[in-house]
Image (spheres, grey):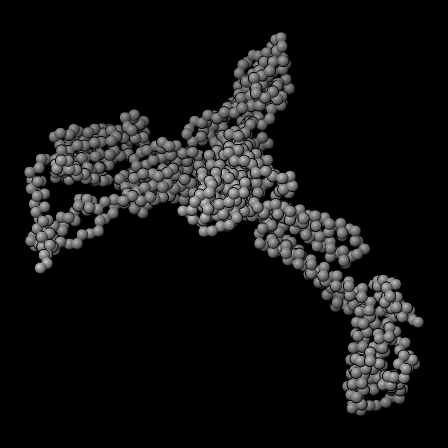
């Protein structure tokens, strides 16, 4: 019995594992070992380069956009780009509204500023103060959502993007270089953790995207989206509600205690403007 | 027979006209009254003269000619009333009286019963008298405010003007602003609300409910001008356009649908038609209606600059304006442990909202408390005034104690630089403490030994100085479609790469499959070489290739090395079957040494046999 026969029989019965070394030896025995052609090796290198470029091309815009936004904060550039939102400008504007006796607009701008700077103590304090002054109760927040929304959403989104890149590339490298399995698995785990944090933040942030603030002194909530409809209850200026649906000039809103009704859209202002404009 | 009533209408009209003419002929002469307001004006302003003629035939009272005064008609009104069958009418005509020079003017009496009127006109620099209920408009140049061109509404009923001191501002700066609403006399019924700004980068301070009023002549027309003095707060940097708008109710004259012309009647012309087309009748039968409009001022292009970072002092709290700071102590002599009041007075004009001071911090020999602040505005807009900070301080050691100089930082928009105002150091003679003096407590509400920053005014924490990072949209990145798309593509790419690598590994680990693939590849290349040899007529190479192909095939089938497939092995395994295979092996040896030649038909026949054998050796 030849060596080839012994090896193939053992492979067939599962007594030995098919390693690359063994397969190379079998190839030598059978005389059909085939070295990769230079063109194929070149092609493999090209495909790796292509994959890396694709990943970089997909990831770079996020950081470029970040850079653009950060640069916009420079005084020279903000002068020529007045259409942006800044937490400080929104905070100052909210203060001005609060001093002018417009709690609805003040709470709206504080809420917007808080979206951009969730950990700013001044914004939180003034928002609490204006809410209290307007006779509105502060929404109760659990420990976990508060922790998850401590960082800026956009920062966490970019962290999540970085985590995705880290986890993806580490997973691919794990298959290409199995001898460094532990390092790549650790990196994959860290990347997955970052992605999970970002996704959790997105889930917690999702309701804020649909929140609106009552900006007029009193906003009646109606049974149906028509002017002649019977009022169910009245919303107070500055009250924060969740917009569930919209129909023509009315929005179906839900209050914090869970009451729902149709309110004229003119009485509300969304915390996140849908058009993205001021 | 149908009566043609139309024939009687001219007759009735003629009778009515005769009655009117007759009554006019026998009526008493009209009584004329005159009224002039105000009695004293400045040069460049206008007074209002109202001439009211009561009684019949009183529609043509003209103002007298007075040298140095110009009379411009601005409106006419008529009134008819009937009491117990007695009809009376009056006509009032209003004129703007525009003086050509300063001095005293006498408007003579227009009728026997009326009296002459006197108008005093002072020079433009003279102080206003106190005999007028109408205050004059402060000239814009004096207050340093300027406005763009006045743009009237299309019908010339009103205008709104925004007067600003400058067009280049800084974030946090407060500038005085005047908002003027001009209304054409008699055409604007009311102002329906306070002026509002069109521009989200600015905040307007509270407007007074009692604005100033004055008269102004534009293009020969008199306008009643209402002026609010306020202040504008700049919120964020950028290039903005700013305008102001005001809701007004204007009177619109609605022409009654023109009556059909009277037929040629007994007068043989259209005299009656012309008589009823007179403005008096048009007014009587027609009328005015009110309409609500919004009048906006010309948009002003403003440039708002961020506060420069260069040269910003450490204690800068965002105050922008021009300020002076002084300090004082409540007493020059005290005893150790007795509280004193340290006052810091900041006077000037600017953003007092951001004028803060922590006053005296931790100083050796002094115990300090939280300071309090109080702002006293010098104007209605809160633009200028005085802010007083008070702090309770307690000298702890006897002797001559010095309260160090306090610094107040602000940004001066005129010089475009940060400035620091230092107060003078204050000294106080402190005598040794009386019994229990050192344990005396100051009347401060909080006995904290280390002062903190000023408590928030109005309960609000102060504005932020830094503008911070600007983003184009408030929608978080997670929910922006381009971000979701790019991340999804990234995930798909990684998933594709992973699937590709897994598949490659699986194929590499499949030994049987690998061997089969390699064998198939070898057979295919041997068969191809056999075909080439057949085409070239090379019998030796043909059979050699055929044998290699069959060896590969049988070796793969029997799990043997190809080299070990010999005729003896074939005989042993096939038990005498497979004669064609044996023959091909024998021919391969024979052709290699004998140089045997085959015809094309033979090549084709053997090719078919080999193809068939390489495909169906499992049947053997």
> Residue A26, located in which quarter of the rendered image?
bottom right
Q: Is residue B455 left or right of residue A267?
A: right
Q: How many marks?
A: 0
Looking at the image, residue B313 lies above or below residue B597? above
Residue B358 in sight from this viewpoint:
yes
Q: Which one is in front, B615 or B574?
A: B574
Q: Is residue A64 left or right of residue B592?
A: left
Q: What residue sits 21% from the left and 28% below the top?
A: B118
Q: What residue sits 18% from the left and 32% below the top?
A: B34
Looking at the image, residue B4 lies above or below residue B118? below
Looking at the image, residue B97 lies above or below residue B127? below
Residue B467 in sight from this viewpoint:
no
Q: Which one is in front, B312 or B172?
A: B172
Image quadrant where one finds the N terminus of chain B:
bottom left
Image quadrant where one finds the C terminus of chain B:
bottom right
Q: What residue sits 78% from the left and 85% below the top?
A: B608
Where is residue B412 shown, x and y percent of the image?
Answer: 50, 33
Where is residue A61 shown, x and y percent of the image?
Answer: 61, 53
Outermost residue, top direction? B435
Where is residue A86 shown, x and y percent of the image?
Answer: 55, 42
Where is residue B30 shown, x and y percent of the image?
Answer: 12, 35
Q: What residue sits 71% from the left and 60% below the top?
A: B497
> Residue B73, located in which quarter of the rendered image?
top left
Q: Is residue B392 left or right of residue B600?
A: left
């Amino acid at each position: 019995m030849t060596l080839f026969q012994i090896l193939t029989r053992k492979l067939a019965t599962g007594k030995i594992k098919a390693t690359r070394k063994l397969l190379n030896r079998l190839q030598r025995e059978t005389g059909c070992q085939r070295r990769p052609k230079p063109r194929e090796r070149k092609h493999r290198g090209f495909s790796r380069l292509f994959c890396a470029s694709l990943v970089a091309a997909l990831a770079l815009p996020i950081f470029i956009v970040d850079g653009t936004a950060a640069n916009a904060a420079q005084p020279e550039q903000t002068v020529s780009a007045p259409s942006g939102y800044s937490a400080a400008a929104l905070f100052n504007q909210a203060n001005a509204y609060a001093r002018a006796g417009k709690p609805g607009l003040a709470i709206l701008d504080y809420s917007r500023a808080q979206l951009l700077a969730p950990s700013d103590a001044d914004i939180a304090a003034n928002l609490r103060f204006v809410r209290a002054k307007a006779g509105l109760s502060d929404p109760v927040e659990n420990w976990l959502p508060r922790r998850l929304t401590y960082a800026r959403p956009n920062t966490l989104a970019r962290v999540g993007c970085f985590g995705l890149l880290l986890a993806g590339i580490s997973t691919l490298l794990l298959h290409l270089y199995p001898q460094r399995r532990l390092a790549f698995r650790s990196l994959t785990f860290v990347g997955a953790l970052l992605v999970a944090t970002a996704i959790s933040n997105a889930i917690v942030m999702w309701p804020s995207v649909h929140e609106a603030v009552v900006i007029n002194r009193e906003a009646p909530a109606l049974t149906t989206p028509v002017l002649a409809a019977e009022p169910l209850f009245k919303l107070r200026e500055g009250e924060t509600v969740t917009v569930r649906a919209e129909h023509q000039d009315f929005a179906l809103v839900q209050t914090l205690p869970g009451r729902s009704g149709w309110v004229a859209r003119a009485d509300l202002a969304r915390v996140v403007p849908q058009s993205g404009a001021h | 027979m149908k009566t043609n009533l139309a024939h009687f209408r001219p007759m009735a009209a003629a009778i009515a006209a005769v009655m009117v003419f007759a009554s006019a002929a026998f009526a008493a002469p009209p009584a004329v009254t005159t009224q002039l307001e105000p009695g004293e004006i400045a040069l460049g302003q206008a007074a209002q003269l109202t001439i009211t003629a009561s009684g019949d035939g009183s529609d043509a009272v003209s103002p007298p000619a007075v040298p140095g005064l110009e009379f411009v008609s601005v409106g006419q009104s008529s009134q008819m009333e009937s009491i117990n069958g007695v009809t009376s009418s009056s006509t009032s005509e209003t004129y703007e009286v525009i003086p050509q020079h300063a001095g005293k003017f006498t408007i003579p009496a227009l009728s026997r019963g009326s009296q002459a009127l006197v108008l005093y006109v002072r020079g433009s620099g003279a102080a206003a008298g106190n005999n007028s209920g109408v205050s004059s408009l402060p000239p814009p140049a004096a207050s340093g405010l300027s406005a763009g061109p006045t743009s009237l509404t299309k019908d010339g009923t009103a205008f709104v003007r925004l007067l600003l001191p400058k067009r280049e501002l800084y974030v946090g700066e407060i500038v005085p602003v005047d908002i003027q609403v001009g209304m054409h006399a008699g055409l604007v019924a009311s102002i329906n609300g306070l002026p509002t700004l069109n521009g989200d980068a600015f905040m307007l301070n509270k407007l007074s409910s009692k604005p100033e009023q004055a008269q102004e002549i534009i293009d020969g027309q008199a306008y009643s001008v209402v002026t609010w003095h306020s202040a504008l707060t700049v919120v964020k940097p950028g290039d903005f356009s700013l305008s102001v708008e005001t809701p007004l109710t204007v009177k619109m004259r609605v022409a009654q649908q023109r009556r059909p012309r009277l037929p040629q009647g007994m007068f043989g012309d259209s005299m009656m038609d012309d008589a009823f087309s007179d403005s008096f009748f048009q007014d009587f039968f027609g009328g005015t209606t009110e309409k609500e409009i919004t009048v906006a001022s010309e948009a002003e292009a403003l440039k708002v600059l961020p506060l420069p970072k260069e040269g910003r002092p450490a204690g800068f709290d965002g105050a922008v304006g021009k300020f002076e700071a002084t300090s004082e102590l409540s007493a020059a002599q005290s005893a150790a442990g007795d509280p004193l009041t340290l006052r810091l007075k900041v006077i000037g004009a600017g953003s007092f909202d951001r004028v803060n001071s922590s006053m005296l911090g931790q100083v050796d020999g002094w115990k300090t408390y939280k300071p309090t602040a109080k702002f006293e505005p010098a104007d209605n807009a809160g633009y200028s005034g005085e802010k007083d900070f008070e702090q309770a301080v307690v000298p702890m050691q006897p002797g001559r104690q010095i309260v160090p100089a306090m610094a107040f930082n602000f940004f001066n928009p005129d010089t475009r630089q940060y400035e620091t105002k230092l107060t003078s150091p204050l000294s106080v003679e402190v005598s040794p403490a009386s019994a229990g003096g050192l344990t005396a407590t100051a009347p401060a509400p909080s006995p904290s030994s280390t002062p903190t920053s000023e408590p928030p005014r109005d309960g609000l924490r102060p504005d932020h100085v830094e503008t911070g990072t600007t983003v184009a949209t408030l929608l978080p990145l997670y929910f922006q479609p381009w971000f979701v798309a790019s991340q999804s593509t990234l995930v798909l790419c990684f998933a594709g790469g992973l699937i590709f690598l897994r598949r490659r590994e699986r194929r590499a680990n499949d030994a049987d499959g690998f061997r089969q693939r390699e064998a198939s590849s070898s057979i295919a290349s041997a068969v191809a070489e056999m075909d080439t040899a057949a085409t070239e007529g090379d019998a030796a190479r043909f059979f050699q290739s055929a044998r290699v192909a069959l060896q590969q095939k049988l070796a793969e089938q029997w799990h043997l090395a190809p080299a070990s497939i010999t005729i003896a092995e074939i005989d042993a395994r096939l038990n005498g079957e497979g004669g064609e295979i044996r023959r091909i092996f024998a021919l391969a040896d024979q052709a290699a040494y004998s140089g045997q030649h085959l015809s094309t038909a033979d090549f084709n026949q053997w090719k078919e046999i080999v193809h068939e054998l390489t495909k169906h050796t499992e049947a053997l």
